[in-house]
Structure formats: structure tokens, C-alpha cells
Amino acid sequence: MTYATDTIFILGKGQSADLIAPQLLIDSFVIAVNDAERIAPTDVTVFHAPWVVRGLADAGFRSSLYVTAQPFDAKGKSVMVVPYQPLNQGSADLLMQRFMSDEFVLEEVLFLSALQIARQVAKLRGRSQTVYMVGFDFDANAGYSKAIDVDYAPPSAAKKSLAISPQEHYFVHALYLLKDSDLIVKHIGLRSFSAMSPLELNSALLHTVSTLDPQRTLRVAVVAELTTNHFGDRLRLERLIRASRAAGADFIKLQKRDVTSFYTPKQLNSPYLSPFGKTFADYRLQLELSADDLHFVDRLCKDLGIAWFASVLDQPSFEFMLQFTPSMVKLPSTISEHTDYLRFVANNHTGKVVLSTGMTDTAYENFVLENFSKCERLYLLQCNSAYPTPLEDCNVAVVRHYHELSYSDPRIVAGYSSHDFGWKASVLAVAAGAQMLEKHVKLGNTEWAHFDAVAVDLTTSAFTEYVGHVREAELIMGSQVKKVNISEHHKYSRSAAQ
């Protein structure tokens, strides 16, 4: 079969495969591992375990060629029988050696055999190929794609875990060995070595979501709110930014305030124990970033391909930030009563304005809508200013109200600033129409930092998982346009009856 692109998909059965746009597989050369062809039709399927045949029969034999260790009846499809090499202590050392040679066997680690087939495709085409590894979650407990409604594999959880757990190591090793080869291999998922997330792959290969459906909403912007958890340490700041970008955030957000004028002398002189001194002034002054720090942030974010903006809490800070020509300014809930300053920003900033609405009611909403008439875009983020926010006080339904306001004023963008634990309220906010989500992040735990309790720890996978849940919610939401999808078919259609 001839394809218009030099793209190969190697398809596993992990849950992440459900996040891939089906048309990507239709338009590409696809190699399935075991019975992954149950997810989508493929060109080649590789397997060696006898149980796989039951899964293939259940799907209706959806591959053009089967590469396997034992002959079987594939209902008219082509079958190629090749030797199978089990993985044991004696053969493990030779596995990667075989991988880089012309010798072809069915390996215990099947995706290595699939990659060897991809190399043969590249050789036949006479040019390099991009290989996307989809559905390889490397987690025995993560579950399968929804298409795998019956698991024909032996039921031993221990054996399954034993088989899957070392595969991540072999994959990373394969990536290393394939550098500068005719295969450009990209893992699609949320692992540290992943090239991109499933939603990022969809966006990259389908160019933009709007090309599929002009009426579909834009990608939800995920903001990693650093607060002051950098502690004024540039190295820590860089780690926070890099980790946020790696987890899939679209923006990082900082804070800027003029400490000496924002707080009263009594507040500044009050006792506060931190590594930076014994007063609150010692603590707050250490946390403020200088112009040189922010120029560093600006350069780093441009290099990493992530945007940034800041909560600007007072007029001196607003005037200070003008040197960075900010396109977006955040006005947090903490200054919702500082109406003189809010009016100043409304009259002097025509770009994008983000407002959290914690500790406010409809009177504040009316104030904002009346005063911020000059801004290019107005992000209204439902927020509760309790840290952490009790579930019963999240009031995600307010996001729907903000989204409905956008019908009469297209400048308005609904969003949610999460001070609750976890991801559930945020994905519900996506369902309610949120196009911006804000989540506090940190590096490890400290006993003295503000907002530490609600911040997601970037030294764990928690923020990556949060972003993954948001992207999955976007996919599930889909489009408001009712149409027949590629995945649908009429079991009792007229043509079938005839």
C-alpha cells in the first residue's frame, strides 16, 4: 500500500492510544504488537504468544500481514513465520546486539521486532521515517485501550507486571541506539522520555484542531502557577520552569509586588521564621524577582517554547513590568478590593487581562465588565481563595456562567483557578467551558512557604498526570457539532440487510 507521508505508527494497547485521532492511523503505515489491531486496522501485526490468536479472531483479523512464530489460519490474510527468541539470562545480552543487526527474530520485547520492521520499511523507501510509538504506557496497572474489552492474555498479574516492567529500559536503550539512524522514533505519552503527548501529536499532524472542525473550541491553556516557590533562587526557578514545560503546561506564571508599599510597616516587621531571616520583610524581599531575573525567565521561556506572565499586584509593579511589554496581565483575587489600582490597569492596558474571582460576588463581576472594556481579551477565572478549597466550595458551575457571558461579549474567556486538591474539579471546569486552568506547583515540600499545601509537587508525576487528565477531558468534550464519526457504524443498516 502507498502512503503520502513517511510516517509509521507502532501500536500498543495502552490507554493512551485512545487519545490519538483515528485518522492519523488511517493515513499511515501501522505495525501492531500482539492484538492491538483491535484498536484500529493495521498493515503488519507481530506476535508470538498463542493467546493472541483469540484476540485477532475477535477483531476479525484486521491486519494485512501477520509476522508470528507459529502458522495459523488468518482467514485469507498473509502469514510470515519467523523464529521466536525468548528472553532469558543467557539471551538478554544479545537482544540489543540483534536489534542493530540484520538478523530478524521475534523478540520477547515485541516492539523491538516492530522497530526492525520499520527499519526495513525505511530501507525500501530509501529515506528516513518518523516512527510514533503509541499505546506503550509501560505500566502494568494502567489498563488497556477501551477497544480491548476482553483480555485474552493469561490472567496472572504478576507475570504481566514481570513482562512489562523491564520494557521501558529496553525502549530507552533503543532510542539511544537509533540516534542518527534512518528512524526518528518518538514516544507518545507522558513519560520523561516522551517526545510529545497524544494531544500534541494530534495538533502537530493535523496542523490545527480547527482544520478538523471549525466550530471546535481551542486548546485549554494550562498555567503552572509558580507563586513564589522559587524562593528567589534562579536555579530553583529554572528547574520549576523546565519541569512545568516538560509536564505539558502552556504558561508559567510568576508574581510581582512592591513589597515596601504593598504591606504595612506593621506587617513587614512582624515575626516570620524562614531561611532568609526572622521578619516577614526578610521573607518577602527575598522572594521578589529582579529585572535581571525576569529577563532570564523571558529568554528561558522563549528557548523552551513556553509562554509566561505574572500576577501584578500594585501600580509600581505594573509600571515595572512594562519593560517586558506583557501581552497578558493577571490581577489576582487578593487585590479584588483595590479598585483604584484595578481601574488604573483597565485604563492603561489594552492587551489580555486575567482575573481570578475568589472572595468576590456578582458586584465584582459587574465592576470588571464595566471597567475592563478596552482590553483585547478578558479571562474570568472562577476561584475560591481557601487553601485548600473544600469540594463543596469549588462552584465550578460559575465557569459555565462565565462561558455564557462570552456569547454576548466574545472577548470573555472562561477559566478556573484551582486551589483544590487533584484534577477532578479542573476537568469538570473544562466540561463547563473553561479555556484556561491555573494550578499551583512547587519543588518538594517546605514547612515555611506560602500556598505549599495546595501546590502540586513537580518532583513527582502529579502535574504531568493533571495535564494528562485535562487533555483527555478536552478530547472527550469534542465538538458541539453533531455528526457521524469514523468510529461509528450501523449494525443493522439497510445495506447490510440487502
Image (cartoon, grey):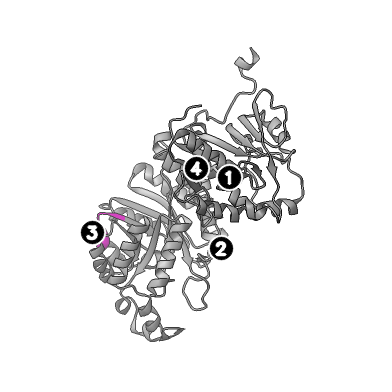
Query: Residue tagged by mark 2?
Result: 390
Query: Residue tagged by mark 3?
Result: 347
Mark 1 or 4: the one toward you? 4
Q: Which quarter of the figure is the C terminus placed in?
A: top right
Among the 4 quarters of the image, the one containing residue 300: bottom left
Helix, strand or loop status at disc 1: loop
Query: Residue tagged by mark 4?
Result: 131
Compute the Cα span from label 3 to label 1: 51 Å
Q: Can you give x and y, in whole percent of width and height, for residue 36 in the image?
A: 63, 38
Q: Can you give x and y, in whole percent of width and height, for residue 92 in the image?
A: 66, 54
Q: Can you give x and y, in whole percent of width and height, for residue 237 in the image?
A: 40, 69
Residue 112 versus residue 153: which sits nearer the camera? Answer: 112
**Can residue 383 be seen from the camera position used here?**
yes
Mark 4 or 2: the one toward you? 4
Q: In the figure, is residue 209 to the left or right of 31?
A: left
Residue range (magenta): 344-352
Compute the Cα span from label 2 to label 1: 35 Å
Residue 97 versus residue 33: which sits nearer the camera? Answer: 97
